[in-house]
Image (tube, rainbow, N blue to C red):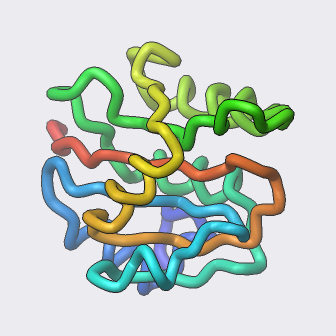
Amino acid sequence: MLKGIPKILSPELLKVLCEMGHSDRLVIADGNFPAETMGKDAKVIRMDGHGTPEILDAILQVFPLDTYVEKPFNLMQVMPGDDVETPIWDVYEQIEEKYEPRGKAAIGQIERFAFYEEAKKAYAIIATGETALYANIMLQKGVVTD
């Protein structure tokens, strides 16, 4: 165990986060996301017993978001015609605002199929047990400046 590191961050996940470089992408996927299919060229980390908010909060404590792009934090956009509420997005925004000076201005959305294409290029995908719909997040890593 280490001091100051959230306990939910496993040694495997910490190693992956450390290996990632500037502009690499990390997907935190809900339980319905095809993580193994999308992650054929990525590192897939299973965290099935955990929800996305607790994982996101822990990661953002150690993971800088990219300051060179306008939207380093992206959500999977709801498909037109889907009558789905996304209250988990409000939770994500509250978590993100604790760690990102730009606040919700740094949060964007990517159309569902474009999100899948971008996920195929991600460095890593975390497969969670999150049951909320459209609960997928893509983070772009920045640099540590201090």
User: Image height check: is 112 above or below 52?
Assistant: above
User: Image height check: is 142 above or below 13?
Assistant: above
Q: What percent of the width, then of the height, locates residue 141? A: 26, 48
Q: What percent of the width, then of the height, locates residue 88? A: 77, 38
User: Image height check: is 11 above or below 69?
Assistant: below
Q: Residue at x 31, y 43 (%)?
A: 64
Left or right, residue 119 beside residue 68: right
Q: Residue at x 32, y 55 (%)?
A: 118
Q: How many marks?
A: 0
User: Image height check: is 145 above or below 49?
Assistant: above
In this view, the residue in front, 3 or 12, is 12
Q: Residue at x 49, y 55 (%)?
A: 59
Q: What percent of the width, then of the height, locates residue 7? A: 61, 71
What quarter of the picture does the C terminus occupy? top left
Identify the image quadrant of residue 116: bottom left
Q: Residue extending furthest front? A: 81
In this view, the residue in front, 95 or 32, is 32
Q: Residue at x 35, y 85 (%)?
A: 40
Q: What percent of the width, then of the height, locates residue 38? A: 43, 74
Left or right, residue 135 beside residue 72: right
Identify the image quadrant of residue 125: bottom left
Identify the image quadrant of residue 73: top left
